[in-house]
Image: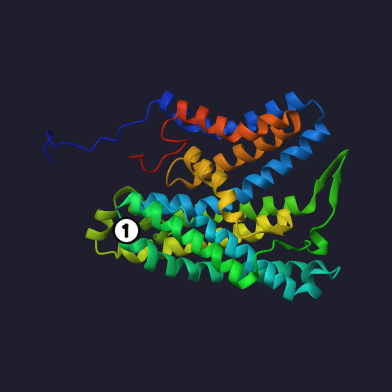
């Protein structure tokens, strides 16, 4: 080989830049420590922290699908809340049919009832997502204003369909026997259901991260987020990938609807549009298209909402908005943006 041959050179990221990239990961423990100092009582702090983590995990489940749809498809889907509401109603209907299982003292029967309800909700909302993408979203790819209008219209239609099928009244249902009550750690009482929500949310995050980082489908999704035209030029059918991602995001919203409904023990046709404010805040804080950023943003929102509700209830009303403003002043594109805002 000639001595003058040009060798590839890999640029090393400066240490300062590496530290800045890792900083958002520290926000959650820092906020938890600040909460401990402000609250003072370790038992109250532990109860509020687990409640905040559970709330954050449920918001993450609903927001994770939306952020990937944003990133890959460049679709502003204001109808995402429809899948949350439909998922909750389907899940509650299944749980009502399985009332004998949920009222049983058997933990296995309780878990089986919840799993069947979640599976039914995800299947229905996934299929609804298929129809939503084909009929409403596909004709307006690349046209953001029309996307906002038609997806809002889709959300309203879905709410009216819920009125037709389930009626206008809110539905109440108790959690399965095994998920009721609290576990006592020292002087802190922690609801069992919140521990379940934390476990499910964490498992989902790890599963999504594994799929996106270590599988071919995940590689195509990440490549599609970076440069969809290049993926299509390599022979992959990007539109089919769009559809799969949209259906998966819709199914995750259905799962989140069941989890949120069991958390509140009451559901309404408008619950999807009401929770969408928090979902959009989490997506913006995390950065468009980023699952990791969405996860950190959801935990920050959940913890801050619970801490401020305990310390200063009036401030809690604006705490999440204030958090978003502070994060965007620090990082205008969000914590870990995959797609740059246009």
Q: Residue 34 appears at what percent x and percent y?
A: 68, 26
Q: Quadrant of the N terminus?
A: top left
Q: Nearer the viewer, residue 43 or 304?
A: 304
Q: Residue 261 appears at what percent x and percent y?
A: 68, 58
Q: Quadrant of residue 36?
A: top right
Residue 214 visible in the current orientation:
no
Residue under the image location 57 percent in, 59 percent down: 84
Compared across the picture, whether 314 is left or right of 131 comes to right
The residue that disc 1 covers is: 140
Q: Residue 91 appears at what percent x and percent y?
A: 65, 67
User: Which element carries disc 1, helix, strand or loop?
Assistant: helix
Q: Quadrant of residue 48?
A: top right
| 2, above or below 23, in the image | below
Q: Nearer the viewer, residue 73 or 141?
A: 141
Residue under the image location 50 percent in, 60 percent down: 156
Residue under the image location 72 percent in, 53 percent down: 264
Residue under the image location 56 percent in, 30 percent down: 322
Q: Quadrant of the C terminus?
A: top left
Residue 248 visible in the current orientation:
yes
- The tally of labels here is 1
Coloring scheme of the render? rainbow
Q: Residues within 10 Å of mark 1 (few under 14, many from 20)?
A: some
| 169, above or below 203, in the image | below
Q: Residue 202 appears at what percent x and percent y?
A: 62, 51
| 294, above or below 3, in the image | below
């Amino acid at each position: 080989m000639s001595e003058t041959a040009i060798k590839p050179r890999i640029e090393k990221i400066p240490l300062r830049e590496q530290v800045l990239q890792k900083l958002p990961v520290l926000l959650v423990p820092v906020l938890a420590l600040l909460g401990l100092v402000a609250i003072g009582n370790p038992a109250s702090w532990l109860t509020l922290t687990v409640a905040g983590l559970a709330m954050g995990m449920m918001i993450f489940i609903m927001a994770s699908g939306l952020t990937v749809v944003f990133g890959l498809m460049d679709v502003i889907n204001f109808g995402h809340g429809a899948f949350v509401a439909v998922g909750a109603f389907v899940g509650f209907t299944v749980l009502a049919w399985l009332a004998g299982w949920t009222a049983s003292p058997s933990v296995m029967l309780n878990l089986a009832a919840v799993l069947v309800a979640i599976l039914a909700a995800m299947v229905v909302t996934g299929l609804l997502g298929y129809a939503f993408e084909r009929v409403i979203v596909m004709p307006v790819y690349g046209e953001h204003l029309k996307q906002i209008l038609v997806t809002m219209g889709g959300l309203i239609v879905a709410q009216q369909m819920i009125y037709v099928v389930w009626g206008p009244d809110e539905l109440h249902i108790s959690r399965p026997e095994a998920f009721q009550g609290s576990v006592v750690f020292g002087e802190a009482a922690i609801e069992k259901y919140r521990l379940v929500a934390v476990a499910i949310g964490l498992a989902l995050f790890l599963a999504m991260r594994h799929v996106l980082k270590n599988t071919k489908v995940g590689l195509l999704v990440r490549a599609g987020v970076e440069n969809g035209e290049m993926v299509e030029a390599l022979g992959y059918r990007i539109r089919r990938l769009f559809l799969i991602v949209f259906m998966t995001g819709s199914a995750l919203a259905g799962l989140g609807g069941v989890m949120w409904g069991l958390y509140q023990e009451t559901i309404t046709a408008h619950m999807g549009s009401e929770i969408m404010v928090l979902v959009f805040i989490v997506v913006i804080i995390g950065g468009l298209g980023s699952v990791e950023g969405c996860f950190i943003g959801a935990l920050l929102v959940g913890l801050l909402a619970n801490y401020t509700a305990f310390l200063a209830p009036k401030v809690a009303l604006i705490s999440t908005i204030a958090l978003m403003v502070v994060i965007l002043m620090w990082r205008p594109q969000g914590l870990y943006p995959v797609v740059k805002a246009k």
